[in-house]
Image (spheres, rainbow, N blue to C red):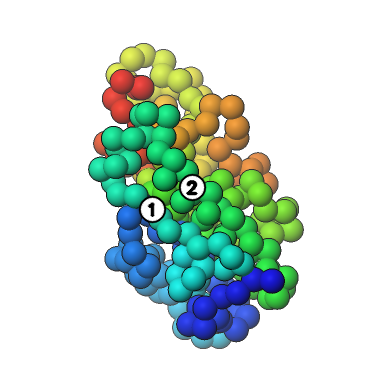
Amino acid sequence: AGRVAADQEALCGDVQLVHARGTGDQVNDDFFLRVDDQLRNRLGTPPISYSTYQLGKDGGFGGFDYPAAGDRMEFLLEASLNASQLYQDSRDEGIAELVAYLNHRTAQCPGEMYVLTGHSQGADVTGRALAELSNGILDRIAFVALFGDPRFQTYNTQVIAFVDQCYFPRPVWQRGTSECYSHGWYADDFAPYLPDAILDRVGSWCRDGDVACNGPVVWR
């Protein structure tokens, strides 16, 4: 059975934010606080009841404890060398925690909806976890917001080199200023980036120049 720390234990409500932090970030980091504040403002005041859950906070859940291990410089140095094992182990721990938590929480709170957010490594965690969730749980997710996802992949190709013009339209989930052909460090060319069932409820933001979600210049 899953366990959640006391200060993360929330009564069932209308909406819960579930967040996965970025590489090397601490819980309650500035990024999470901004996301939390913006979502609270969008939801307004009660009668909408709202709570949050952060992966890896106070012991994690169900025997899994997402560490967001590594630092950004290590990521840049090791990602090109068939990836960092530290990063992969950390990411996989996060995926396991997120899947276990949502399986438990959705069963306990049948009327609750979820907003999932992930930053950097946390975006990688969240995006991969979606493929492991049942359609019933996916239906309970109101929106997924990914920021700087190292697995970012548009499956698009440039018409002309060095020009942001591609053969196919931008996918509905691609947000931000990145090129239409962007391809992150950990992009998987042989697996769907997102499950079809949730494509219209995902936004993946990638800034031009962010090497995590754009990859190195030589890939473009």
Residue highlighted by disc 1: 69
Q: Quadrant of the C terminus?
A: top left
70, above or below 212, in the image: below
155, above or below 54, in the image: above
Q: Kindly report the distance in space between the C-alpha atoms of the residues bearing marks 1 and 2.
A: 9 Å
What residue is shown at x 37% (from left), y 29% (from top)? 81
Q: Tag 1: residue type?
A: Ala
What residue is shown at x 69% (from left), y 71% (from top)? 1
Marker disc for residue 30: none
What residue is shown at x 59% (from left), y 45% (from top)? 199
Dot 1 or dot 2: first in sequence order is 1
Q: Position of residue 162 (x, y in %)?
A: 30, 19
Q: Position of residue 141 (x, y in %)?
A: 61, 60
Q: Can you see residue 202? A: no
- Relative side of 94 to 102, left or right: left
Residue highlighted by disc 2: 89
Look at the numbered discs 1 and 2 and tell me whether their residues touch, using CB distance below 8 Å: yes
Q: Residue furthest top?
A: 160
Find numbered disc 1 in the image and state the secondary structure of the residue it sits on.
Answer: loop
Task: Depth check: give the residue in front, 217 or 23.
Answer: 23
- Mark 1 Cα shell of 10 Å, populated few (<14), some (14-19), many (≥20): some
Q: Position of residue 196 (x, y in %)?
A: 65, 42
Q: Position of residue 53 (x, y in %)?
A: 50, 71
Q: Tag 2: residue type?
A: Asp
166, above or below 149, in the image: above
Task: Depth check: give the residue in front, 96 or 113.
Answer: 96
